[in-house]
Every structure is written in C-alpha cells, then in structure tokens.
Image: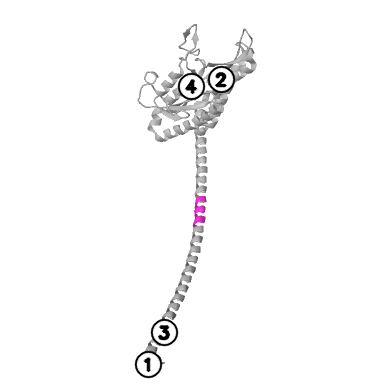
C-alpha cells in the first residue's frame, strides 16, 4: 500500500529528489498510472509481451478517465484560515493543493499463483478472478467508508505472479492520507497530541505504533473477509514457528476448510435454488388450478348458454310450425270460400 503525489519526489535544497528516504524511486502519480497501463518506457522492469492489463472499473473505466480524475483531485482548491499580521484580522482564503501532497492511493494484491499457471489453467484463472473481485469489493467498501472514491482496479498477467493494483482518490480533500489506514491512524494520533509528538519523544514512538497497529488490523480484516475464504493463511511459518512439514499440513488444512466452506455455500445456494424452483412450481400449479376453475366456469356458462339457445330454437321451431299450420288452414278456408257459388250470392 502506498500513496503518490503529482510532483513525485520531494524538493530538497532547491532540487527535486529522485529517491525516497526508504530508497525507493520517487515516482509521480502520472508515472504510476503510466506503469499500470504499460505505456512504452514506463515500466522497464517488465518485458513487453503485448498483453494488455485487465481493468475492473470503479468510478473510472479507462486510464484516461483515471488521469483526468486525479488531475481534478490533485488541483482542488481548499479553504484555510488567514490572519493578517498587521491588522490582526482573520479571514478565509483559498489556495490550490500543494503539488507534493499525496493525492493518489494505491495498493497491490499478489496471489501465490504464477501468470503462466493462471493463463494455462482456466479453473485456476477463475479462482484468481473470484479472489480479486472479493478483494476489490473489500477495498472499495473500505475506501468509500473513509470518504474517498474507489477509482479502478487493474490486473496484470505479464509479471511472474498474478497481481492486482487498486487506485483511490479524494476529489474533496485532495489528500488521500485518510484512505491509508496507517497514515490515517498516525495523523489522528499526532493531531490529538500536537507538538508533544516531535521526533525523539515517547509519543513519537507511540504514533508509529498506532500506524503499525492500524496496518495489522487492515491486513487481518482483509484476510478474514477475502483470503481465508480461498485457503490462504494469515501468517507464514516463521511467525508461527512451524517447520516445513507442519506448515504444509496447516496450509492443506486451510485449503480444505476453504473448499468445505465453498461446498457449504454451494449447497446452501443449491437448496435456495431448489426452494425457489419448488415455490415457482407451487405458484404455477396454483395458477393452473385457477385457470382450470375459470375454464370450468366458462364451460358451465357455455353449456347453460347452449341449452338456452337450444330451448329458444325449439320454441321458435314450434312457433314456426304453428304459424305454417295456421297459414295452411287459412289458405284452405280461403280456397273453399272461392269454390262455393252461393257464397258470392249472399
């Protein structure tokens, strides 16, 4: 875990240092992003393979978006109280964030799997991606809880070990110290104790212990939430004072527990899926029964309607027959009157 500034190395005696106090190169935030993107000549320690990094997006989807977001975060204007020495009046002024303020948060998570193994074995690649996604979710939740912004994650397969870079920003405060657990604890401790924390004092040492304690807590949380679920141990054999055989047995036991946990989770998901299917089948059966009841009702109505129509048709037929019979009788009577000679005489 590390943070970087727009300027890069600190300025000492009028010149910019190229090496940090810890001996590492003084990278600028722009150089860090170029290295992640594998810009030519930006990462001389990695042989060019042509394989592009895989981006897991956060608030940024591309490296260009990350650069623009960092530019906005590293040039934010902040308000600060100002007191005029001559008049003694106080006021509020604004100024741009200092170029040496650390404005880009990064973390690297590496797995005990070589890139060659992951690229050759689809199942191993699936396990790596699942672990990376859990780690990304963990860091994103933590960074956002600290008031920051999870920008993106980048996975590289062109180095020895499969690993993932994570990037965080703070476009409100500019500085990303609050996103770094150790530096946040260190700043909080020294702010509470003030000038008494100067170098060489007991409080200065205690502030460094606060930094270490916060980092250990972060590592413990990360292991509990992510790596314990895939069978990785929290500590190596030296910390536990284990021989190689004991350490290998411990690793195998951890892997077995992780597999059992995965199997248990799969079993639970399977039971949930079966319960969901059963509920859907019950719902479908109920729907079918409802439709059958509707069809039965409609069939009964249709039967009643058919009977009513038949009855009405029969009545109409009988009426038609009576009408026809009456017409015949009338016609016969009329014919009889015309054939009778005396009928006209009268």
Is residue 180 shown above or below 262?
above
- Mark 1–mark 3 Cα distance, whole angstroms, equals 19 Å
- Binning the other alpha carbons within 10 Å of mark 2 as few (below 14), some (14 to 19) or many (20 upward) gives many
- The x and y percentages for residue 193 are 64, 16
User: If you read the primary sequence from the N terminus, does the residue marked by circle 3 or circle 2 appear first?
Assistant: 2
Residue at the image point whose x is 52% and y is 45% from the top: 272
Say the numbered circle drawn on residue 183.
2
User: If you read the primary sequence from the N terminus, does the residue marked by circle 1 or circle 3 appear first?
Assistant: 3
The residue tagged 3 is: 330
Q: What kind of element bears circle 1?
A: loop
User: If you read the primary sequence from the N terminus, does the residue marked by circle 4 or circle 3 appear first?
Assistant: 4
Q: What kind of element bears circle 2?
A: helix
- Relative to residue 345, is residue 182 drawn left or right? right
- Relative to residue 292, is residue 196 drawn left or right? right
Which residues lie in the magenta part? 279-288
Indicate whether residue 287 is drawn in magenta. yes
How did the renderer colour the structure?
A: one colour
Indicate whether residue 55 is drawn in magenta. no
- Mark 4–mark 3 Cα distance, whole angstroms, equals 109 Å
Q: Magenta segment, principal secondary structure?
A: helix
């Amino acid at each position: 875990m590390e943070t970087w500034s727009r300027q890069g190395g600190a300025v000492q005696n009028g010149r910019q240092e190229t090496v940090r106090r810890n001996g590492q190169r003084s990278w600028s935030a722009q150089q860090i992003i170029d290295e992640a993107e594998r810009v030519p000549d930006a990462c001389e320690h990695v042989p060019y393979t042509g394989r592009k990094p895989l981006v897991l997006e956060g608030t940024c989807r591309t490296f260009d978006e990350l650069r623009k977001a960092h530019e906005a975060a590293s040039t934010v204007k902040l308000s600060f109280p100002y007191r005029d020495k001559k008049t003694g009046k106080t006021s509020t002024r604004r100024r741009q964030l200092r170029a040496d303020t650390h404005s880009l948060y990064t973390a690297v998570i590496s797995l005990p799997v070589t890139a060659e193994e992951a690229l050759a074995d689809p199942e191993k690649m699936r396990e790596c991606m699942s672990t990376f996604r859990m780690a990304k979710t963990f860091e994103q939740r933590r960074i956002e809880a600290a008031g920051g912004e999870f920008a993106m994650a980048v996975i590289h397969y062109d180095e020895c070990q499969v690993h993932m870079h994570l990037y965080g920003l703070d476009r409100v405060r500019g500085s990303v110290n609050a996103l770094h657990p150790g530096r946040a604890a260190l700043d909080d401790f020294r702010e509470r104790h003030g000038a008494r924390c100067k170098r060489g004092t007991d409080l200065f040492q205690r502030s460094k212990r606060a930094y270490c304690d916060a980092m250990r807590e972060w590592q413990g949380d990360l292991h509990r939430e992510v790596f314990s679920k895939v069978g990785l141990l929290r500590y190596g054999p030296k910390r536990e004072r284990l021989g190689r055989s004991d350490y290998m047995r411990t690793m195998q036991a951890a892997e077995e527990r992780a597999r059992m946990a995965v199997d248990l989770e799969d079993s639970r998901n399977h039971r949930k899926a079966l319960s969901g299917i059963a509920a859907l089948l019950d719902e479908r059966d109920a729907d079918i029964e409802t439709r059958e009841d509707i069809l039965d009702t409609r069939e009964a109505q249709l039967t009643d309607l058919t009977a009513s129509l038949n009855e009405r048709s029969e009545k109409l037929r009988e009426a038609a027959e009576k009408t026809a019979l009456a017409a015949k009788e009338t016609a016969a009577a009329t014919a009889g009157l015309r054939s009778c000679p005396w009928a006209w005489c009268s």
